[in-house]
């Protein structure tokens, strides 16, 4: 069964239709790469999945639960969206770490606030609350170790390199255990010599069969890591399939053109 | 010179007393205007057109007219026009009227500085908060607020230093702040009359106090240097 089903997602900004009916599904434990030139709608699609944009039309289902249905206004309410978006995690192109918090505090912030909210509603007693905080601290340590930043936990974002910041951002997204982790061009803002360390972390996640959607311009990486590739062009899915197949034997003329432009 | 030295103890005592009133007005204005300014800033930023337009209109009125006139209106309007002198005749009534005029006036200036500060925090910060499942409230208090404060310290410092001196305007409704106390020695007060120097001398109080304020604000700015 597919963990994610996306049906007929459409999105307009003013008069420009950026997504013109996107359909795809994703199996649990798979990594999906989305490639395509700038302006093809890749980022908008990811932002729709994370409810940073509201699609004009379409359905989004995770584990067979309808998270969004454009014909059902209930799924558009803010409090509903807040819970449902946690099925997804998002790693931004520009990291967006919180500058006033250390790496460790960045990772711990969201689960800590969630725990505090429960404590305020009195659904947790003081002991439960305390043990939760300990767990969060432990998880955050573990995740930062996993992304190779054990020795930089107490550094502020401006004291870290771009690659290190992006790895903190990945740990920050992972601590909420999203069903699907989305990456929006995670290495585009990095110096070339720093992309490797970030890609290595993502590769490590795919080896652990983490379900992921990766929007990327790193073609080689997409081919190596992804189980499935989607090529988008002009707001539609132009071609999709097995990575080796799509990269070596593209069927659509537009895919061919795109790949040739990338090689040069 | 000898005369001045003779008058000095009496004058200093009176000026100190006036300066306490100045300090009280200064502190209460900051205490009130900091939070009120934030509420007004949220008003201007509101997506509801009526709220945003109303607050912008109020800001236009308050910033567009002299604080001195606002003081006069707040103090005299209820009694002279509405025949309902709510402030009473005493010093405490004058202080309350002055405090209200100052708080509203400074809150409007602060609100525009806050608004600029909030808008200068990159949209990515809020989006990062949203995808982590935070509420708008949590995002404001745990992410945006401190970044905003860091950005607004220099312009707010300017306003605070201006406020120290603006308190002198309250003299127009006879609030007994330090200028009032200094001027009193010209007409006669504490057995001294015809002395101009106490009025000039008040400048030192402002100067010294603003020195302290400047140092404190620089310290605060350095405190926030730990992040960028």
Image: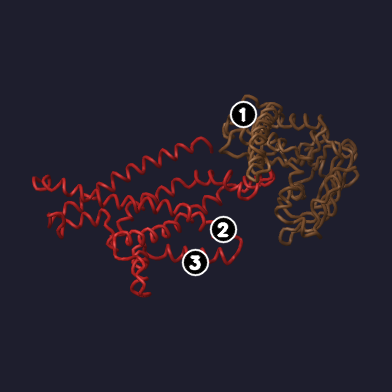
Do badges 2 and 3 share one subunit? yes
Q: Which residue lies furthest to the left in this view?
A: B2
Do badges 1 and 2 share one subunit? no
Q: Position of residue B177 (x, y in %)?
A: 27, 55
Give me the C-alpha separation between circle 2 and circle 3: 13 Å
**The C terminus of chain B appears in which quarter of the rendering?**
top right
Question: Which residue sits at x=77%, y=48%?
Answer: A49
- Tint of chain A: brown
Residue B6, numbered circle: none
Give me the C-alpha separation between circle 3 and circle 1: 48 Å
Q: Quadrant of residue A144?
A: top right
Q: Where is residue A98 in the image (x, y as percent from the top left)?
A: 60, 40
Seen in the image, is B153 located left or right of residue A2?
A: left
Q: Which residue has dot 1 on it?
A: A153
- Tint of chain B: red
Question: Which residue sits at x=16%, y=58%?
Answer: B186
Q: How crowded is mark 1: few (under 14 residues within 10 Å), some or many (20 or more)?
A: some
């Amino acid at each position: 069964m597919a963990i994610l089903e996306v049906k007929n997602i459409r999105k307009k900004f003013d008069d420009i239709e950026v997504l013109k009916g996107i359909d795809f599904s994703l199996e649990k434990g798979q990594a999906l790469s989305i490639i395509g030139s700038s302006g093809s709608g890749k980022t908008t699609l990811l932002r729709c999945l994370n409810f940073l944009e509201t699609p004009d039309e379409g359905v989004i289902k995770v584990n067979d639960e309808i998270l969004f249905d454009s014909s059902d206004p209930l799924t558009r309410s803010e409090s509903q969206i807040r819970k449902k978006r946690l099925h997804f995690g998002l790693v931004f192109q520009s990291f967006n770490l919180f500058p006033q918090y250390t790496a460790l505090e960045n990772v711990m912030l969201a689960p800590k606030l969630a725990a505090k909210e429960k404590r305020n509603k009195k659904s947790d007693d003081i002991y439960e609350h305390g043990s939760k905080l300990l767990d969060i601290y432990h998880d955050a340590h573990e995740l930062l170790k996993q992304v190779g930043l054990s020795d930089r936990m107490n550094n502020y974002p401006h004291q870290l390199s771009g690659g290190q910041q992006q790895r903190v951002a990945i740990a920050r997204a992972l601590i909420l255990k999203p069903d699907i982790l989305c990456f929006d061009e995670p290495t585009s803002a990095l110096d070339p010599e720093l992309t490797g360390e970030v890609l290595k972390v993502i590769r490590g996640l795919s080896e652990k069969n983490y379900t992921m959607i990766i929007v990327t311009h790193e073609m080689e990486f997409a081919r190596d890591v992804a189980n499935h590739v989607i090529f988008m062009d002009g707001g539609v899915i132009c071609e999709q399939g097995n990575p080796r197949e799509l990269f070596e034997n593209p069927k659509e003329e537009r895919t061919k053109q795109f790949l040739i432009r990338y090689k040069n | 010179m000898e005369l001045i030295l003779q008058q000095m103890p009496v004058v200093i005592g009176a000026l100190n007393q006036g300066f306490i009133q100045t300090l009280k007005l200064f502190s209460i204005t900051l205490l009130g205007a900091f939070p009120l300014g934030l509420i007004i800033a949220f008003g201007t930023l509101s997506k509801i057109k009526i709220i945003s337009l109303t607050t912008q209109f109020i800001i236009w009125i308050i910033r567009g007219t002299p604080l001195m006139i606002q003081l006069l209106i707040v103090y005299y309007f209820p009694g002279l026009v509405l025949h309902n002198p709510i402030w009473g005749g005493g010093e405490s009534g004058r202080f309350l009227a002055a405090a209200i005029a100052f708080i509203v006036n400074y809150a409007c200036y602060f609100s525009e500085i806050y608004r600029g500060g909030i808008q200068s925090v990159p949209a990515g910060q809020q989006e990062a908060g949203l995808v982590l499942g935070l509420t708008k409230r949590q995002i404001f208090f745990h992410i945006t607020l401190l970044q905003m404060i860091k950005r607004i310290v220099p312009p707010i410092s300017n306003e605070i230093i201006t406020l120290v001196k603006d308190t002198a305007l309250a003299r127009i409704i006879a609030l007994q702040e330090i200028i009032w106390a200094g001027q009193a020695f010209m007409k006669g007060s504490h057995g001294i009359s015809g002395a101009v120097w106490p009025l000039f001398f008040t400048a030192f109080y402002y100067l010294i106090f603003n020195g302290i304020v400047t140092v404190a604000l620089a310290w605060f700015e350095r405190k926030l240097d730990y992040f960028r």
